[in-house]
């Protein structure tokens, strides 16, 4: 009798503990200048466009802008001009105390909006036209290599001003056991971080509880990729021991809570295929295995830890 594989590979749904995504960065058009260096303020313009063809001609829809800041000097005044009906929400803290929010009937076209800001503030630091996106990144500070004035260009691309786009990626996998009260073991087998890169790139693995509360759980990650990658592990609200075994290099992002004790085993000779990887993990004492996930292309994985029961 042939022994059946313990892992029947099926397309994974949203209930699978490991979700694969492809995160990319892009802009439709933009510009940047050093024109505000001698002025008391920087001026950054963001204009969002819908996904539909011809969306550039449509009226702006009200939005909720959620502002997150890092390493900004406290107490500096910030002004947000937003289109009518839009709101601005801040993270908890004192940043909002120095902020002014102005709801206005802003010009719709790119050049019209740029000219409006230049008339009001004399110069513009950056202009970014983006498709509707989940996250927008703006790095404050003027770059002296830019020109004196901001001239919109469809070929403009800067790492300082980008929109990020996340698309779910199809995977196959299985769940071999429910959440153990002590430890979870997740195996990820990735074919490539993207379809074209020949260089080593980062693949992020985001580890967090399904609920907001801190979860006490030991976790083992077995990470295999056919291409050369650097696995970057980010933990959120997890307390316990984290063992990472990977076919390539491993980085662990800052662990501000200091809750996780990390043990890394980089550049391990891991086999390929679900049966071989599961067997390898079990032979090395990483059991019971919680899940196995096989993904053709992705650069971001999200693992949600569940309470037992």
Image (cartoon, grey):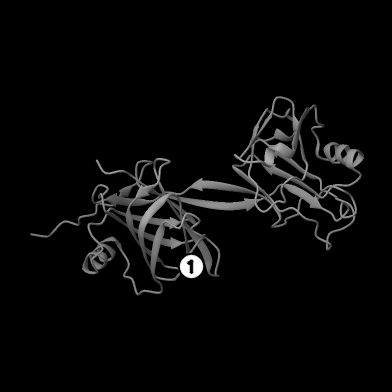
Position of residue 253 in the picture relative to residue 119 (left or right): left
Q: Residue 295 in the image: x percent, y percent?
A: 40, 56
Q: Residue furthest top?
A: 85
Position of residue 83 in the picture relative to residue 228 (left or right): right
The residue tagged with tag 1: helix, strand or loop? Answer: strand
Residue 158 drawn above or below residue 199: above
Q: Is residue 246 visible?
A: no
Q: Nearer the viewer, residue 112 or 285?
A: 285
Q: Residue 106 in the image: x percent, y percent?
A: 80, 31
Would you identify the image quadrant in which residue 141 lies? bottom right
Q: Residue 243 in the image: x percent, y percent?
A: 35, 64
Residue 67 drawn above or below residue 36: above
Q: Residue 54 in the image: x percent, y percent?
A: 71, 34
Q: Nearer the viewer, residue 50 or 137?
A: 137
Residue underneath mark 1: 229
Q: Quadrant of the C terminus?
A: top left
Residue 45 drawn above or below residue 296: above
Q: Nearer the viewer, residue 87 or 117?
A: 87
Q: Residue at x 84, y 47 (%)?
A: 41
């Amino acid at each position: 009798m042939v022994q059946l594989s313990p892992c029947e590979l099926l397309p994974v749904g949203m209930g699978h503990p490991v979700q694969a995504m492809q995160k990319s960065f892009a802009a439709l058009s933009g510009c940047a200048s050093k024109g505000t260096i001698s002025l008391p303020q920087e001026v950054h313009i963001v204009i969002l466009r819908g996904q539909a063809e011809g969306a550039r001609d449509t009226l702006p829809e009200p939005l909720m802008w959620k502002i997150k800041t890092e390493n900004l000097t406290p107490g500096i005044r910030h002004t947000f001009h937003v289109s009518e009906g839009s709101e601005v929400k801040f993270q908890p803290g004192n940043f909002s105390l120095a902020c002014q929010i102005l709801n206005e009937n802003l010009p719709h076209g790119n050049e019209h909006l740029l000219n409006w800001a230049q008339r009001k503030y004399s110069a513009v630091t950056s202009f970014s036209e983006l498709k509707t996106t989940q996250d927008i990144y703006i790095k404050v500070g003027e770059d002296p290599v830019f020109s004196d004035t901001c001239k919109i260009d469809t070929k403009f691309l800067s790492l300082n001003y980008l929109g990020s786009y996340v698309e779910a990626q199809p995977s196959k996998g299985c769940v071999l056991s429910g959440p153990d009260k002590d430890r979870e073991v997740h195996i990820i087998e990735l074919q490539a971080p993207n379809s074209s890169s020949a260089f080593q790139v980062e693949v992020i693995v985001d580890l967090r509880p399904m609920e907001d509360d801190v979860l006490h759980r030991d976790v083992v990650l077995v990470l295999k990729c056919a291409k050369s990658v650097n696995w970057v592990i980010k933990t959120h609200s997890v307390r316990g021991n984290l063992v990472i075994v990977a076919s390539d290099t491993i980085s662990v992002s800052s662990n501000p809570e200091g809750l996780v004790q990390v043990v890394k085993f980089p550049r391990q000779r891991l086999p390929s295929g679900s049966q071989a990887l599961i067997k390898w993990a079990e032979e090395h004492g990483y059991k019971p295995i919680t899940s196995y996930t096989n993904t053709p292309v992705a650069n971001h994985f999200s693992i949600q830890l569940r309470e037992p029961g």
